[in-house]
Each structure stands twice: as structure tokens, then as C-alpha cells.
Image (cartoon, rainbow, N blue to C red):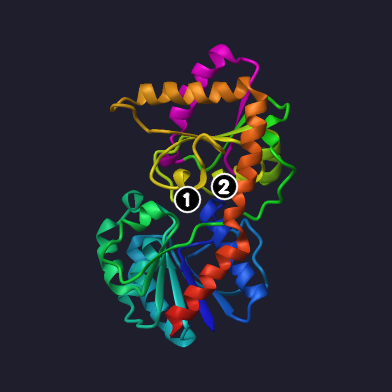
Amino acid sequence: MRIVYVVENITGVGGLQRILIDKMNYLAEHTMHEIVLMTVWHAHREPHFPISPAVRFVHLNVPRSMAFLPLALWRFRKRIRRLNPDVTIQLRAVGAFLTLFSGWHGPTIMEMHSARQAMNHRWLYPLIEKKVDAIVCLTNGDARNYPNARRVEVIPNFSTLPPLGEGRGGASPRHVVWMGRDCPEKDLPRLRRIWAEVQKTHPDWALDIHHNTSDVVGAYTAGSIFVLTSKAEGFSLTTLEAQQMGLPVVAFDCPYGPSDIVIDGETGYLIPLTVNGSEQEADRMFVEKLTYLMDHPEARQEMGTAAQKASQRFNKERIMNQWLKLFAEIAK
């Protein structure tokens, strides 16, 4: 089976690029399928994450501008017909646009990495629902946003980080870890407001903010607690990774992701984005739960151990078997 992934670019350092490359590498190295990665925009640097030599590259090499979409569409139409894939997987708006308007009628899957309400180009998504053979969401909450789709599947992400012992949350480092891109959805200003309150009573603790670190494992192992203050998430791979590394999590229960990963009161705490319409009251609750974990190493240890065990639900083999099953059914 020939499987073609269509993505705008692959050179970023976010969770989308990391998990997409992990999946393609797995398929190329552990199955008999031919995996093709088609990128749209011209890339000025090499991919940040290593890609298996078994993955075949196809570059449309279009200047990164919406003004060049007609050129991208023309080049895509030529390449996709020549490739004649058994399954085409499109990511983000540009990939969807090319697949929908190229005249290609082969089996198609739209792979979502953000909640629908956080997407740009929202006019495109009713067309996606009607045209593609399946929409794959990362969470149950987002799956409910596509009531008119032919088929909706929930296939979460997985983590490839090695587990390091049980319950690192009880470890001695007095560091709280945050990791992610600096973008409005992650709401770093809110995190800093919360941390300013925490520092009033816990000046001996430090907040580690990681944007594009190359040592992901080292970032997690340097901390005892993981925090997430996002106002929207597609899944939050960093939350899953933190749990896999044995860290308890304090997170805002944003749409969507945290509630699919964190078991409130067992592997961490989920805080509502607002309480009776008040962000300040929600922030107070966040500070309360975070400082409780700071003050109780035995609770950190217990929750960290539970978090690591719960993360096994997102086993790579289990997740990839879901994808392989979907490919086989769509290709028919």
C-alpha cells in the first residue's frame, strides 16, 4: 500500500512535526507499506527531527504565501496523479485545500492536530466533512465537532520517550516544568501571573520554561511537577510525555486534550478555565493545587507513579495498530 502524507512543511519543532515523523518512521520501518511525505512550502532548513531514509520525500517547493496556492495546486495535481496513492492523509488547511480542489478522488483522511474552534480558515471544514472518507481527531471532545462527517475516528498521539523509574514527582528538585511553543493558545502570560503568586510563598522553587529544547528528557527529569496553562489544545503531547516520565500534572481543563490524559485527583489536577466566569478564581484554584503538590512530596510521588502507569494507555503499538486498521478499511 502506498500512503502519502500531505503537510505544509516539516521543519518546525512542535508536537505535530514530532509525532508525524514518529508515525511515518514507524510505518516505513515496521510495515510493508510505502510511505511518502509531500511538503508544500519551500523549506529553508532541514527537519528538526530525524526522518527514516525509508520515507520517500516529494517537495512541491512553493514559496510560502497564499498567493502561490494556484501554483501549489497545479504541482500537487501532477504529483498526486503520478503517485496514485492507496490512501492520502492531509494535515492542516493547505493540505486539505490541495486534496479537496485538485480533482483527486482516491481515499482520503483528514488528520486533525488542533481543536476545530482553534482552526484558521473555518470555511473549509464543512467541505472537509463532506468530501473526505474519514476525519481522525486526537480527542473525544473534538470528535463531537464533526457531526456531518462520513466517518470520525479518535486516535490519540503516543510518546516515544523512555520511562525513567516510577513517580519522579517525589524527586528532590524544586522545579516546576512547562514545555511548548510560545503562542497565544499556550497562554504563557497567564502562567507567569500564576507563578508570581506561587513565588510569594515558595521562593525556593523555580519555574523552567522550555520552548525548543533539544534535550526533552533532561527537561522533564529536572522537574518534579508539570504545568499546562493552555486555553486550547489539540492533544498536548507534552502532558502525556510528562506523565510518562512520572510527573504529576496541574492543567487547565481546556478544550481539548488534558481531560483525555489527566485523571483528576489521581494523576494530577484539572482546573476549570474560569470559575463562575472569573479567571482570577480559576487562577487561585490553580495556585492552591500547585502549592499543595509543592508542599507534599509524598503526594507528588503517588501521583507521579499513577501518571506513569496511566500513560501506558497511549502505547505506540496500540495506537499504530489503530492507524493500520483504518488504512486497510479506507483503502477498500
Would you identify the image quadrant in which residue 148 lies?
bottom left
Residue 24 part of the magenta-drawn span: no
Kindly check if marks 1 and 2 are in contact, taking CB atoms under 8 A apart as contact: yes
Residue 129: tell me if it is visible.
yes
What are the residue bounds of the magenta stretch? 183-212
Res. 90 mark:
none
Residue at image location 31% in from the left, 56% down from the top: 145
- For label 1, the residue is 235
Residue 13 percent location from the top left of the image: 57, 51
Residue at image location 49% in from the left, 84% down from the top: 83
Residue 82 percent location from the top left of the image: 46, 87
- Quadrant of the image containing the C terminus: bottom left
| Cα distance in 3D space between marks 1 and 2 | 9 Å
Element at label 2? helix
Residue 184 part of the magenta-drawn span: yes
Classify residue 308 as left or right of residue 273. right
Residue at image location 50% in from the left, 57% down from the top: 156
Residue 217 percent location from the top left of the image: 69, 44
Comparing 293 with 299, the one in front is 299
- For label 2, the residue is 240
Question: Is disc 2 surrounded by few (<14), some (14 to 19) or many (20+) residues within 10 Å?
Answer: many
Count the numbered circles shown.
Answer: 2
- Three-letter code for the amino acid on which mark 2 is drawn: Leu
Classify residue 71 as left or right of residue 239. left
Q: Earlier in the sequence, mark 1 or mark 2?
A: 1
- Quadrant of the image containing the N terminus: bottom right
As displayed, is residue 24 above or below residue 285? below
As displayed, is residue 287 above or below residue 120? above
- Three-letter code for the amino acid on which mark 1 is drawn: Phe
Would you identify the image quadrant in which residue 67 lies?
bottom left
Residue 91 percent location from the top left of the image: 43, 64
Residue 71: tell me if it is visible.
no
